[in-house]
Image (cartoon, rainbow, N blue to C red):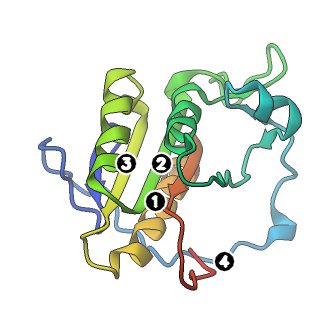
Amino acid sequence: MLGRIFDGSGRAIDKGPKVLAEDYLDINGSPINPYSREYPEEMISTGISAIDTMNSIARGQKIPIFSASGLPHNEIAAQICRQAGLIQKQGVTNKGVHDGHEENFSIVFGAMGVNYETARFFTRDFEENGSLERVTLFLNLANDPTIERIITPRLALTTAEYYAYQLEKHVIGHSHRPLCLLRCPSRS
């Protein structure tokens, strides 16, 4: 699934080969006891000095991006996906693979309710910069069925959990939503 682009229902839309399932996972997932989680100590470098120094992001943390109309939130989200990597003490390894190594690092990006221009921006940006090979992209367009806006983040989270727990990769999960003017769902 790495390097592929899917719609909000999980169907491949990138004209690549058909995706053959190794396993079928429930997108509703299982609740995780927050007390049993390991304390996050590894920092994720975003490549943006203001974020890395003023509001550093630990592994396992959500990355919200708040913005107003006209500000470059799409460019910032794409830049974080392009440049993100783990920072760890020199010489420390995890199961024989250095944590910062690109082969052990992937990004799951879900965009819900975006217009075609925004979807094309992210697709083109990841393709042009060579980061698409480590990104799985879920795109729910504004003209797609509304129910997909509930399914898309669950698909993205299940994919990220699959990469993290079954493939033992380090994963950044990012979801992008345009500003909601009405009541937004609290769970996604």
In percent of the image, x 66 and y 55: which residue is there? 66
Give the labeled residue for mark 4: 31
User: Is residue 88 shown above or below 6?
Assistant: above
Q: Name the image quarter holding the C terminus.
A: bottom right
User: Is residue 166 shown above or below 89?
Assistant: below
Give the labeled residue for mark 2: 108
The answer to which quarter of the image holds residue 105 is top right
Q: Which amino acid type is shown beneath numbered disc 4?
A: Pro
Q: Are marks 2 and 3 in contact (CB under 8 Å)?
A: no
In percent of the image, x 51 and y 28: which residue is there? 82
Residue at mark 1 to residue at mark 2: CA–CA distance: 6 Å
In percent of the image, x 54 and y 57: which residue is there? 161
Rendering coords of residue 92 (x, y %): 80, 21
- Image side of residue 6 versus residue 14, left or right: right
Rendering coords of residue 162 (x, y %): 49, 55
Of the two numbered discs 2 and 4 on the same chain, state the one appearing first in sequence.
Answer: 4
Q: Nearer the viewer, residue 17 or 73?
A: 73
Give the labeled residue for mark 1: 156
Residue at mark 2 to residue at mark 4: CA–CA distance: 20 Å
Rendering coords of residue 134 (x, y %): 43, 33
